[in-house]
Image (cartoon, helix red, strand yellow):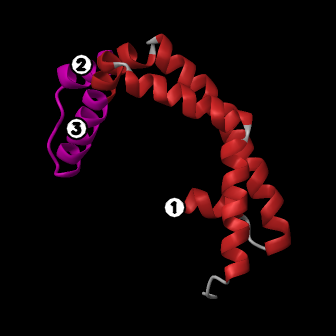
Amino acid sequence: MSPITPEIEQAARALGQALRANPAAQAYLEASQRVAADPEVAALEKELYETYESLIARQQKGERIQREEVQAFNVLRNRFFSHPLVQERESALQPLKSLFIEAAVEISAPLGVDYTKLAQKG
């Protein structure tokens, strides 16, 4: 792998700043901040992802997850994702994804690397 030159680093920083300043990124960041600032929603999100990670870890160890646990997880997930603040954040995510795809396409051709495929591998 080639070393990162100061020019490449500077270009990457400029790209990051331009992406962050984009209205789609700003809308997503603001929606994410509203989710994080709401104690109820933040607690729900934490519980959701902790439960998910626990279930996955147990399943990977070969443990059979009971139907009731899966149903309880689905209820929690639906409760979280139906919250208006979360719906707002999720709605803001799609334009942000489109922005990142557009940026990846724009930088892939000149550099000769398909960044969308690299991102899928990660």
Q: What's the residue type where badge 3 is placed?
A: Leu
Image location (x, y in percent) of residue 78: 39, 16
Q: Mark 3 points at which residue?
A: 55
Left or right for 105, reference 6: right
Q: Mark 1 points at which residue?
A: 122
| Residue depicted at 23% across the width and 33% down the height | 51
Q: Which of 25 and 66 is in front in this view?
A: 25
Check disc 3: other Cα within 10 Å, few if <14, some if 14-19, many if 20+. Answer: some
Quarter holding the N terminus is bottom right
Q: What's the residue type where badge 2 is placed?
A: Ala
Q: Magenta span: helix, strand or loop, mainly?
A: helix
Mark positioned earlier in the residue sequence (3 or 1): 3
Q: Mark 2 points at which residue?
A: 72
Check disc 2: other Cα within 10 Å, few if <14, some if 14-19, many if 20+. Answer: few
User: What residue span does the magenta drawing correspond to?
Assistant: 46-75
Check disc 1: other Cα within 10 Å, few if <14, some if 14-19, many if 20+. Answer: few
| Residue depicted at 24% across the width and 36% down the height | 50
Mark positioned earlier in the residue sequence (3 or 2): 3
- Name the secondary structure under disc 2: helix
Q: Do the residues labelled 3 and 2 touch (CB within 8 Å)?
A: no
| Residue depicted at 49% across the width and 11% down the height | 84
User: How far is the residue under mark 3 from the one under mark 1?
Assistant: 22 Å
Does 80 appear above or below 28?
A: above
Left or right for 66, reference 48: left
Image location (x, y in percent) of residue 119: 60, 59
Does 37 appear above or below 56?
A: above
Q: What's the residue type where badge 1 is placed?
A: Gly
Mark positioned earlier in the residue sequence (2 or 1): 2
- Name the secondary structure under disc 1: loop
Q: Which of 14 and 2 is in front in this view?
A: 14
